[in-house]
Amino acid sequence: MTVFGYDYLVDHLGKERAEALELRSYQGARGEGEDYALEALNFVDGRRTVQAIRDALTVEFGPVPTGHVASYLRALEEIGVLRQ
C-alpha cells in the first residue's frame, strides 16, 4: 500500500482518516503498525474472518485488538482494495 513515498491508502481515503486507523500506528510485541497492516492484507484470502486474521497477526507479531484489524479492513474495502 506504500511504495517510494506514495501511500495508496492516504491518497484514496484521505490523510486524516488514514492516520486515524489505529492498526497503522500500533506498536506490538514483535512488530509495529506497518508490519501489522501489510500482513493483515496478506492474510485476506476470502475464507478468513476478521478474527482469524487478527489471530494470525497475533501469532506473528504479538497481540493486537480485533477492532484495529476490523477498522483497517473496512477502510480497505471502502477504497476498493477489498470487497466482501
Image (cartoon, rainbow, N blue to C red):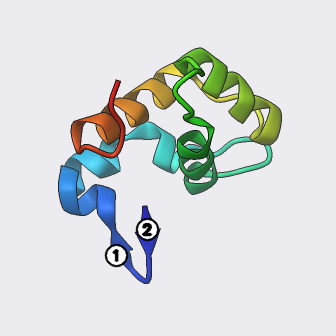
- Residue at position x 21%, y 63% in the image: 11
- Please report the residue visible at 36 percent of the width from the left and 38 percent of the height from the top: 82
Tell me if residue 74 can be seen: yes
In this picture, is 53 found above or below 16? above
Q: Is residue 14 at all visible to an observer of this figure?
A: no
Contact flag, marks 1 and 2 (Cβ < 8 Å): yes
Q: CA distance from mark 1 to mark 2?
A: 5 Å
In which quadrant is the C terminus drawn?
top left
The quarter of the picture where the N terminus appears is bottom left
Q: Is residue 47 above or below residue 75?
A: above
Q: Which residue is mark 1?
A: 6
Q: Is residue 72 above or below residue 37?
A: above
Disc number placed over residue 60 in the picture, else none = none
Tally the marks. 2
Q: Residues within 10 Å of mark 2 (few under 14, many from 20)?
A: few
What element does badge 1 sit on?
strand
Q: Residue at x 63, y 53 (%)?
A: 35
Q: Amino acid at mark 1?
A: Tyr
Observer-nearest residue: 66 or 42?
Answer: 42
Percent of width and height locating residue 52: 65, 19
Residue 21 % position (x, y): 37, 41
| Residue 69 horizontal/vertical position (percent) | 50, 30
Q: Secondary structure at mark 2?
A: strand
| Structural crowding at the residue carrying mark 1, measured as other residues with C-alpha within 10 Å and reported as few (<14), some (14–19) or many (≥20) | few
- Viewer-closest of 63 and 9: 9
From the top left corner, tell me how far across and down residue 47 is, in percent.
Answer: 58, 21
Residue type marked 2: Thr
Instruction: Name, please, the residue furthest toward the bottom.
Output: 4
**To which quarter of the image does residue 44 belong?**
top right
From the image, tell me which residue sits under label 2: 2
On screen, 7 above or below 39?
Answer: below
